[in-house]
Every structure is written in C-alpha cells, then in structure tokens.
Image (cartoon, rainbow, N blue to C red):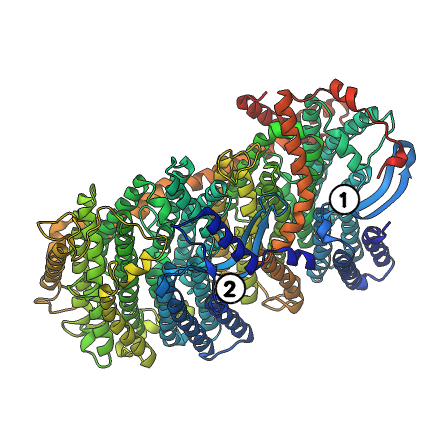
Amino acid sequence: MSLILLSLMVLPLIGAAFIAFNKAEWAKWLGLGWSLITFIWSVIAALAFFDWSDSGSMQMIFRREWIPSIGVDFSLGVDAVALLLILLTTLLGPICMAASFTAINERRRLFYASLLVLQAAMTGVFASRDLALFYFCFEFTLAPMYVLINLYGSTNRQAAATKFFLYTFTGSLIALAGFLYTGWKVSLWNGGLWSFDIATLTEYASRMSATEQTWVMFALLAGFAVKVPLFPVHTWLPLAHTEAPTAGSVILAGVLLKLGTYGIFRFVLPFTPVAVLQYAPAIAILSIIGIIYAGLICWVQRDVKKLVAYSSVSHLGFCVLGLVALNSAGMVGSVMYMVNHGLSTGALFLLIGFMYERYHTRSLNEVGGLASRMPIWAFFMVFFTLASVGLPGLNGFVSEFLCMLGAYQSGATWGVGGTAGPLGPWFAVFAATGVIVSAIYLLFMVGRIVFGPLQEPADHHAHEVLPTDLSVREISTLAPLAILCLVLGVYPAPLLIALEGPVAETVAMYDEVRANSAIAEAPPTVDTIEGESVVLLEREDLP
Amino acid sequence: MLDLLQNLPTLTTLAAEGADAAQSAGMTSYEFPGVGKDWMGLIPLMPLISCVLCGLFWFLGVKSKLPAFTTVLFLGVSFVLTVAAYFQIHPEGLVQRVMWFNWLALDTASEGGGLYIDFAFYFDSLTILWMLFVSGLATLIALYASEYMADDKGPGYCRFFFAFSLFVFAMSCLVMGDNLVLLFLGWEGVGLCSYLLIGYYFKKPSAVEAAKKAFIMNRIGDLGLLIGIMMTWTQFGSLEYSEIFSQIADLNASGEEIPWAITIIPYLFMIGAFGKSAQLPLYTWLPDAMEGPTPVSALIHAATMVTAGVYLIARMYPFFVLNPTALAIVAWIGGLTALLAATIGMAQFDIKRIMAYSTVSQLGYMFLGLGVLTSAGGAFHVFTHAFFKATLFLCCGAVMHGFAGQLDLRKLSGVMKMKGWGIVGIAMLVGCINLAGLPFTAGFFSKDMIIAEAFVTPGFGLLGWIALLTAGLTAYYTFRVFFRVFIGPVEYEPGDDHHGAEESQDHHEEEAHDHGHFHPHAPGWAINAVLAILAVASILVAGVYFMGDHGGWAGSMVHDSTAYYESPYAAHDGEAHGSPALFGLDPHKAMYYISGVVALVGILFAWFLHLAGRKTAATSRADALKVKLGPIARAAENKWYVDEIYNAIIRVPLLVASHIFALIDKLIVDGLVDGAGWLPRGVAKGLRPSQNGIFQNYATGMAGGLALLLIIVWAMSMTGGSG
C-alpha cells in the first residue's frame, strides 16, 4: 500500500484550494511553487520507489473500497508507461504556470487553480487501476479545460470550448457504453459480481465473442479516437488549440491528446484483441490518411498556431500506427511518441505563445524573419522544429522510426526480423511519406517566421513588461524541454528497455489470440468459453 | 536505473560474440571486426567538442576569431588521429570497432537476444579513405573560413563554426558508423548542417528558399534510405555491417537463391544516394545551395557531404553486385547526370554555379564508376575530386570575397594579373587542369579508370562515349572560367553585395554609391596558405595512382574493404590478364591517349571562344556562337527548365491538393459535424422553439462524424474481405 500516487493526485488539489483562498496576486507564485513541488516529488517517487527492472507490473499500489455495491474501488497503481506519462504531466505543470505569468492578468486564481485541478485529473487517469475511477478522471479533465479555453482563450473561444467539450464528451459517453457492456459481460462470468478492476477486466474481456468485441472496440474508439484525434474526427482540435491560452494548448497537446492513445493502449488493445486484429489495417489506414492529409493542410495554414495544431493530428497518426502494429517495436515506439510529442509540440506552443504576447498576431503574413529580432527565440524555434521533424539525435526520430519500423515488421513474413501482425511494409512506406510532408510544412513555417527579412505588424509596440527577446523566465520554461529532447534522442536505450515490460504482455496476448484463431480457424464463441472457464471470483481474491 | 545500464551489452562481450560467431560459421570471406583502440573513438568526438565549445562561445557572445581557431585545432587533432588510425588499420587490412554507448535497444527480453543499435564506429580501409579527406579538408577549410567569415565576427561567426563542427561530426557518424541507423543519423545530420549553412544569410529570401529546397529534396532521398533500412532489418534481423555482410557472405558461399528482399534493397539505397549526391532526378538543390558561404560550398557541397551517396553505395556494394539491374541503373543515372550537368554548366555565367554543376557532373562519373563495377575507380575519383574541387571553390570564394560578391564571369577579367592574386590564380589553374583532366593530373587518372571500365564492361559502351563527350565538355567549361576570369585584359566590376550579408538589405544603396572607388582586397595569409596547400595536394594526389597493387593506393584501400568487387571484365593496367582490349590497346592505355586528346580539344575550344582576341570582360567570340545556337543556348542557360518543370508537375499540384484538403476539412469533415446539427436543430425548433439548440446541434454533429468513421472502417473491412 503506497500513498505516493494518491499524494500526486491530492497535492495539486490542495494547491488549488490554497490558491482559491489567497490573494490573486499570489496565485501565479503559489501555482508555480506548488506544481514544482509536485514535480520534484514525482521525480523522487519515480527514481526511488519504482522498480524499473520490473517495469511491466503495477507498482505503488493503493486500493480502498469506494462504491462496494457495484464493485468500484479507489485503486491506484502504475507501470512504466503510466509512470512516464505522469512524469510528463507533472513536468508540464510548472512549465505552464511559468509560461502564463504575463499572459494571464485577469481571474488569475481560477486560472492557476484550474491548471492544478486539471493536473490532478490527468494524473488520476494514468494512475487508475479501476475503470470507474479512470472514467471519472477522464471525464473530469474536460471541466477545467473547458474553463481554460472558455475564459482565457482568444476571440472565438466560446465556440471552441463548446465544440471541444461536446465533441469529446459525446465520444466518451459512447466509450462508457462500451465499458459498461464489458463490465456487465464480465460480471456474468463472475457470478453476477461486478468488478471494475482493470486487471480483471483485461483478463476476461477478451473472451467476448468476435461480434461483441467489434462493437465494444468501436464504442471505445469513439471515445479515444476523438481524443487522439484520429482522422476524420479531428476537427475539434485545430479550433480548440487556436483559441486556447498558451498553457491550455501546451497541456492539450502535451497530455490530453495522450489520454486517447493511452486509452487505446490500456483498454482497446487488451479488451478486444480479436476485433483489433481484424480492424487494425483499417485503423492504420486512417492514421496514415491523417498523417498525410493533416500534414498537407498544415502547409497552407497561415495561422501558425493552427499549423502546429494540425501537425499534432499528423504526428499522432504515427503514434496510433505504432500501437496497432501490435509488436514490441511499434508499441514501445508509440509510447515514446506520446512523451516526445508532448515535449516538442508543447514547446512549440510555448514559443508561439511567447511570440503572440509580443506581437498580438499569429499570422504568418504579418510577422516574419524574427531571427533578427529575437535570436534566442529563433534558436529554440528551430531546435524544436527539428525535434518535431524527426531529426536523428533528437527525440522525435527515435519514436517515429520505431513506429514505422513496427508497422513495417508487423506481418512481414520473410527474413529474420519480421514479426506476426496485421500490418506490413506498405503501411510503413506510406506513413514514411509523412516524413517528407512534415519537412515541407515545418520548414515552411520556420522559413517564414524565423528566417527571411524581418517583418512586424505595422502598429507594433514593444511589450510593456517583456524584453524584445525571451526573458529568463521564458527561457527556463523551454530549456528543460530542450534538454529532454536531446537526452531522449541520444540515450533513449534505458527507457526503451523499461518500456518493453509493459508492452510485452499485450504482445504476448496477441500471439496467443493468433495461435488460437489459427487452431480454431474462427474466433472462439461465447458458449465454449463460458463452458470451460467460468470462474467464480470472490471479491477477496481480486488482486 | 543502474541495473538497466548494467544490462546493456558491453564492448567486450559484443566483441567476443563477434569472434565466436565468426569461428563457428567458418567464415572466410568476411571478417568480424576486432576491438579497436579507444583513442580511435576520439576521431568523431573532436568535432563534437568543438561544436559544443562554439555553441558556448555563441552563448557567451564571443566576438573574436576564437571559434575559428578552436574549430581548426580540434579538427586538426581529429585529422592526426585519422592518420594514426590509417596506420593502425591499413597495413594489415584490419577491420575494427570502437564502441561509445548503446543508443537504441529493442526486444531485449526475446530469445534472440534482441536488437541493439550502438553509437559505435566501424573502421575498415574504406572508412579511413573517406575520413582522411573529410577531416583533412575540413581542417584546411576551417582555417580558410576564419578569414573568409571575418566580417561576421560575433554571433554569426560562432553560429557558422558551430554548424561547421556539427557537420564534421555528422559526417564522421555517416562514414564511421558501424550500423545503418548511425549512418542515417549522420545522413540527416549533414543534411541539417547543410540546411543551416546554406541558410546562413538568413535574411536573404533566396538563401532561405535554397536551404529549404536542399533539405526537402534530401528528405525525398532519405525516404528511400529509411525504407531500405527497415527492409534490411526485417531481412537480416540486424543493422550492423558486420552482421549484414557476414550473412551476405554466407549466402554467396551457400549458392542458394538470393531472397527477393535483398534484390530490392539496392534500389531503395540508391534513392537515398541520388538525393544526397545530387543525381538525376534529385540534383536541382545543389546549384541553389551555392547561396551559402563559399567555404561551406567547398566542404559540404563539393568535397564531402555530396560524396555520401557514393559512400553509401560503396559501403553496400555487396548488395549491389548481387543485382546487375541495380548496377546498370546506377551507371546510367550517373552517366546521364554527368552529361546533363555539364551541358548546363557550359551555359552559366555565375562561376560558383558553374562549379556546382561541375560537381553534379563529377559525382555522376563516380556513380558511373560504381555502376560499371569499378568501385576502386569511383572511390579514387571521390578522393581526387575532393582536393581539386575544394581548391576550385575556395579560389572562387577568394574572388567573391575580394570583389564584393562578384561572381559573374562577364564582369571580371585578368584577376591573376592583379597584385596579390598570384597564389589564387595558380591554385585555380591547378584545379582547372585537374577538373579538365589534362594528362598526368590526378583528375586525369581517376577519370580514366572510370571511362576505361565503362568501355570494357559489356553493355556500357554507349555510356563510355557519353562519358568521353562529357570529359570534353568539362574541359571546355572549366577553362572557360579560367580564361574569362583569371587571364585576359584586366577589368572588374564589384558585386553589389558585401559578403558579410547580415546587413546586406540595409546597405544596398550605400554599396551602390561605393562602386566608384572600389578596390578589390587581395586575400590574406590564411586564404593564401590554404590555397597553396590544397594546390600542392591536388597535384601530389596524382602520385597515389602509382602506389599499391590494386589500381593505385585508393584501389588498395577499397580492395581491403567490403566495397571491393573483382570485376570479371576488369582491365588490369599494364598486365596482360586476358582482359579485353580497346582499339587494340590495353583499355587504360588507350584511354590515356583518347581522353588526353579530348581534354585538349575542349581547352582549345575554350581558348578560341573565350580568350583569343578578347578585348573586354563582357564580350567574347562565344557570343556569336550563342546567337547561332539560339533556343538551345537559352534553354541550357535556363537549366533546361527542369526547376520549372518540377514546380509545375510536383509542387503546384501538391499545393493545390493541400488547399483542397484544407477546404474539405473545413467544409466537409468539420462541416458534417456542424452541419449535421442543422437537422435536429430544425426539429428542435419545431418542437421547442424557445430552446437554443447548440447542445443537440453538436451532439448530433458528433454522431455524424462517428457515423462517417464507422462507414469508412466498415467499407475498408469489407474490401479487405477478412470478414
């Protein structure tokens, strides 16, 4: 029984309450201090209390009964994947706080408190070992994000906030239906006892019939694909990103989108293996369409924030592609992608936010050639663009390469290096054209906004507080991200090895499903499964 | 975390495994690398340190020449170490490996032991051959640049040497990496540095555009390489050269049928090579890359980076010799590129661009050499070309530096006769005779090795004639530059662009007034010293042709590596090996006479058209010829409109598609979401007119989007037929 994860959830909440009852002038310092403490604590926890050599199993477990009548527990625990994403969340926390010091001047208490509440909810999503708790946190992220966009965004913020809320909310409602069906089905095999323990559900859910799995998969995907967002349900994202305040965009790109891919990794893949095996090519094709289609759309955007937003759609396509490759390379790469995209795209949003604060425009037609005005800003802009382009030596390459490699190997039946899987070389080849497309639009962006002759809006006045180039505060929000991009690009090996553990179980599960279907020629029906393996689990037996 | 680190494979165990595997397989044709000396790992580290230091100077705001001399020092050390490594490796033809650390690891828990991609360096004689001229020339050119870039002292200067050092590091990784992923790191790394340095004068829109073009065109090639890497991995389960080559050697020894994947891999690597080495159809970025400072053009876009494609094919030669079709494509692409670029080079007026086209053309020769099975000839030409082309570019740079950016050969004349320009003129002459292939120069011997093989290898006779024609054209355009710019009546007009162009936009008008009292400034000690050294080196390189037993020293370096292939048609110089004769003579001997004559004819044409009777800088007898040729001359001057064609058939359609996609996204994909809400809103209005339908609106719209998703998925699964 470990209180660490609980503390990581509760600390930000206490901080939020603290901010709410103090002076508005203190809000930013309290927010920064509190999130810094949380971050440091999470790093200590990850280094000292997590056994990295056993990264595949749930650790730092905490469990209390919550709603015993329907088998809902307050149950926490992390493996390497969840822990990594929690670390990403706690890292982006203080960075978002520090980035908002001059940008947010009204209703500051609500702003910083919302950020902390959001952080608590996101931590809860990754730390949950109970489906009900997961879903609660998953939905709860919407509220603070809605507040952030709706109150602190730019001109079209209300429409964006509403669209964001309704689009993702509707999706997750459908996902809820899928979860409930799974829970009900498992309770049938369990003598009518309901359980929302994720490990239990994972063990039994895959016994649903192929048809059931298909429906459940689509239901869950409705929730998670919108969140990712996968083509063609991505259109809420550019709007939300463009209108959100800088901190909101960073969190949105950095963590909230990962709730979708994490959900696919944690639930869709283990719950519905038969359906996933069947539909993986279709999902992969949607990802690839997203990679190329959204990438080309980036090229013709003139709002730089929208450009980066669409690039997220394109990039996350690689992430989903890696997941549905269903082999070690692809899935490890995909998890790495979640982290790497959070770092580099988060940083790009910060940079655009800093520029916006100075020029009050995001239009590529109005500003350009800023390298001669803001060399430090330009350096970071080029650096994170390169990380985003997937330059080897920086973090983006490792994950992009592994995702494509995973897709390539998956189903390659010749040679030594092929693995079983639903995809194949052509998927990787088409996805790889995204590498050219990303170079086209990102270098277009940098060529306009960083390089070329200096261009500033005609009515431009120097900011009353901020210096021409980045301030020390702003640099210190970017520097940690830059260092991480470099470190994860040059020495990702320990992390890659650590991520194998959590991924291995899913990979093994798919090997088994493949073996079974090869024997039976058809997916097992409910009857046979019910006939041979109805096991009555007592609640006490649950792990 | 510590446990994890300890689990990584260490240097010793890996080496031991290698040795075991080699013994158990009873391998004769491929030797697993032994453990190299630790200091050999410093060769790539030196430029990296220099890069970090220059970055630090940049950050600290250093305004002296410190970054330049730091770079020269560290690159010099790297060169000395490379020479030492040469003596370590070459005499016995050893293959060695030096490990830095493990970079990527996958599937480490699997039975096969998983896959490790290391930051490790592979030393065989091919590596050393490349590294010798890379680190040597980089040192010299850094010294040259210390003076050339002196007007930019400050942030620009630091930025320049930062990227310069980073380039040398990336190039070292490319050449010395012991696996394909590290090669890819170097491959993209040199592309990045090329991007940063072409765009060095970032206020100039043309420079930014050229940098972008270079990077994107390279990326198209990189796509091929990337897919080739994935294919190699899938085929061999490894990306380390030692593993790949030993498997290929086993395959050859077993006499089994070659798996189809192995025959595809060369085509993929080829795409990468053609992108990086500016061959058809991906060559158009290189001439534009001349927007960068001239030292960059000399090092990156002439001597080193652009030969990476040649290196890739030479390194992967065992794959290529298994596929005659792939080799033929390499040969034809090389030969045609050589001819095409030479014809464009003849009609240009910008001397730096002429040199750029000549680089494209010479690279074509190298690919031709690889294609007609003389990897030794290809590698030798890379080596000699690196020296004389760097010399030529640096001479052009000295002129550009001295005449305020003037590069038009119609506006400069008789430069050699001016005070203080003697060394530049002589170095230029040395470069020109090499490039033109005048007898007994290094360029003459290396080019002959290739052309002779093209004639004797069955099926490539036509290419031999193309190569000979190109040699004549090369001699013509090379001496066109020399006769126009360096000798003849003394006359000059300064450029309108001070090469320290950081401020160029602001100073244009000022410069215009300055023209009246412009004085060219002759190069200082650093530029002169570097040019003198390079000129001497370019001449001396010819001597290595007579060293060693396998077609010269470069040939013997190739002979000791996997790039070597004993061509059944090889024309053995001086030996009666039963090799085919050319015009009744030993092919190489015959080629000495023929190509010597061809070169002289080309020079004669240049003399007649551009020097004899020329009174001014701007006009010559060639003008009359140009009028007669009319549209042909115009098309050549406009680069055969290739850029325009690419723009029309690739860029514009892609841009149109992007706009259409953006529109579709707004109107249809998103419109469906929003628009689907109109129906229920209407219904809602009818039922409850007072209510604002926004929630239903979106919720229903959302459902519409999901329906679309479901329909697409369903349609795809139906066509998949998996039921």
Kind of residue sitting beneath label 1: Val
Residue carrying label 2: A371
Where is residue A62 shown, x and y percent of the image? 85, 47
Q: Is residue A289 left or right of residue B436?
A: right
To which chain does the residue with label 2 belong?
A
Q: Residue at x 81, y 61 (%)?
A: A24
- Of labels 1 and 2, the one closer to you: 1
Q: CA distance from mark 1 to mark 2?
A: 40 Å
Where is residue B60 shown, x and y percent of the image? 55, 75
Kind of residue sitting beneath label 2: Ala
Q: Earlier in the sequence, mark 1 or mark 2?
A: 1
- Which residue appears farthest toward the right when viewing the image? A69
Residue B81 lies in quadrant: bottom left
Q: Is residue A126 left or right of residue B502?
A: right
Where is residue B662 shown, x and y percent of the image? 52, 39
Of residues B519 and A91, the one nearer the viewer is A91
Characterize the local packing of mark 1: few (<14), some (14-19) or many (20 or more) Cα atoms within 10 angstroms: many
To which chain does the residue with label 1 belong?
A
In this rendering, the answer to whether A533 lies above or below A332 is: above
Quarter containing the C terminus of chain A? top right
Of residues B203 and B465, the one nearer the viewer is B465
In this rendering, does residue B172 appear at all? yes
**Residue A22 numbered mark, or none:** none
In this rendering, the answer to whether B314 lies above or below B711 is: below
Q: Residue at x 72, y 45 (%)?
A: A56
Question: Are dots 1 and 2 in contact, CB under 8 Å?
Answer: no
Residue carrying label 1: A125
- Mark 2 falls on what kind of element? helix
User: Share a chain, discs 1 and 2?
Assistant: yes
- Which residue appears farthest toward the top when viewing the image? A527
In this rendering, the answer to whether A376 lies above or below A106 is: below
